[in-house]
Amino acid sequence: MSLFPPNMVDSFRSIPGANATRRGDVWREKALVCVAPSLLCIIALLQIYLVRTASLSPWKGGGFGMFSTVDSSEARFLRIYLVTEYDQIPILVPDSLNPLARKARTIPTLQNLTGLGEHLAQGTWVPYEFVSAMQRYQNLHAGDEAFPDTSATGDISTGMMSVVENEPTISLEGLDLFRMVEPGEAEPSPGSALEFTSVRVELWKYRFDNQTLTLIALPHSEVTVAR
Amino acid sequence: MTRDLVLVPGGRNQWLSALNVLLGKIAALRGFDLYATLTLFLLLLYSDDSPWIRIPITVLCILAFIFVPLRRSAKFWFVVALLVLVSNYQNWYQADNHKYLHGYWCVALFCALHTRDPERSAGIAARWLIGLTFLWAVFWKLSSDDYLNGSFFHFSLLIDERFHRVAQGLGGLTERMNELNHAAYRALVNYDSHLSAVGLASGPAIAGVAALMTWWTLILEALIAVAFLWPEEKFISKWRDYFLLLFILTTYLVAPVVGFGWVLAIMGLAQTSNRSALLTLLYIVTFVSLQVYRLPQLLLP
């Protein structure tokens, strides 16, 4: 298979030393055509290596393994616990750490799982409290001078404030439902933060058995990070 | 104009001549400029979401739409390729495979513009890129633990929303089964779950549909890989465009990953250059069809 038509280089024939130039040009152009396909192959080989050695999901990493296995990054899930003296409490990954969690699921190396665990262990964990939208508005309004004083004008929002003034905050403390205090958020009141000794991060994978129609969760790896 | 569209005795000839005129116009459109323009559409609509990449790519693509010499400039494609590759590098562990392919295709366009026949060089690179993409896809399907036994598509039909209409229409999956499967799935993967297994409900024909999808996909992908990597215009290579068009039209009807379908159609178009106006027309129709496929998703509840 010839890459280029013969007439492309005819003009070189009468020039002394043109044969060498022509060969050089043809090889240069062949090499240029090969750059993108070679890049594809290099990345695909690297992806195979990472799948075999670092449990990278075959769906990711540029190896074209999509739609070949159930083992996508969604098939890997985290079970994370705050370990206290008496108990272990399951927690949700906070939004701010979702990119780290996604990375730990897609390529669950010890380093990635430990990195996620360290961020979680450094956080302050407090019980969830549900506050109604009206209550939240009222709290912000009361504490910020930027809001105009509308009490004299009978503004509708002021009217609503009087309705929710005594609405209690709903605490979910008894349910062991905790959240990490996000960066920039006010420090929690003394005694409300959870005392824990370590964080355990477990990565699980599921596989599907099409004979029994069962989705089976299997432990893949886990790390424990001390506080 | 109207008279051409009226079916009268001998009207078949008029249709054929109209088709000839259309093919003639398509033939005039062929070449580097056509697939460079379609690539601009691709990048404009399906490039990275990060503003640091999206904004410069959008600006560059709009400029290249307006200024024709820009999209024929190697420097332009170098900058675009660099942006796409940087974006893929930053998100390497979560970028979809077609985003990688976008990057390789931009590199191919840049390199082609450094040769004496950019159109032919881009065509050769496109043929290799398509062949290798499908070769790796087939490799993964053959080496997977749960592809050949039908598990992957069976599971996808039960859980993946993209396959929901096929599961309902052909597999007999009911809304109740779908609800149960999603509840089971959530129960297993939820952060506070301690379950180790859940049962899923399956429709009467799901296993059969899964087997059909498994083998259809594998055989078609293998045919494309072989046909595109085979020496040009020999044996199976002559059929390569039809295999690729069939793959794009059937696969993305079920799972509309438009960014992938588009880059395959553009590269398919690039490697047909100077071969057939009909193939060029088919690739363009396919390119448009992928957007049309999305309509039911957008219009139906």
Image: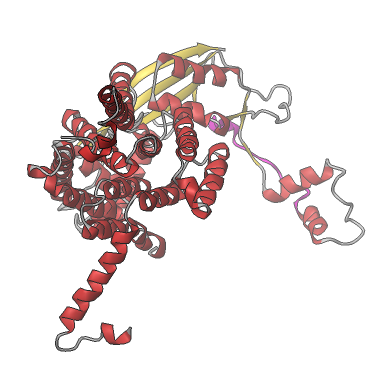
Q: Does the magenta stretch include residue A126?
A: no
Q: Position of residue B25 (x, y in %)?
A: 31, 65
In the depicted view, which residue is nearer to us: B208 or A179?
Answer: B208
Residue that appears at 44% across and 51% down: B41
The count of marks equals: 0
Quarter of the picture holding the C terminus of chain B: bottom left
Classify residue A61 as left or right of residue B229.
right
In the depicted view, which residue is nearer to us: B70 or A60?
Answer: B70
Residue that appears at 30% across and 22% down: A51
Residue that appears at 54% across and 33% down: A175
In the depicted view, which residue is nearer to us: A5 or B126?
Answer: A5
Q: Position of residue B265 (x, y in %)?
A: 30, 50
Q: Where is residue B85 in the image (x, y as percent from the top left)?
A: 44, 32
Please indicate, yes or no, whether residue B174 appears anywhere in the rendered image: no
Q: Is residue A175 magenta?
A: yes
Classify residue B138 as left or right of residue A73.
left
- Residue A39 appears in which quarter of the rendering? top left
Residue that appears at 28% across and 19% down: A52
Quarter of the picture holding the N terminus of chain B: bottom left
Q: Where is residue A3 in the image (x, y as percent from the top left)?
A: 22, 35
Please determine whether, in this image, residue B210 is positioned above or below residue B26: above
- Residue A38 appears in which quarter of the rendering? top left
Please indicate, yes or no, whether residue A94 appears anywhere in the rendered image: yes
Residue farthest top in this picture: A226
Classify residue A29 as left or right of residue B228.
right
Please determine whether, in this image, residue A26 is positioned above or below residue B34: above
In the depicted view, which residue is nearer to us: A197 or B245?
Answer: B245
What is the span of residues highlighted in magenta in the rendered image?
A164-178
Q: Which colour scheme is used?
A: secondary structure
Residue farthest left in this picture: B235
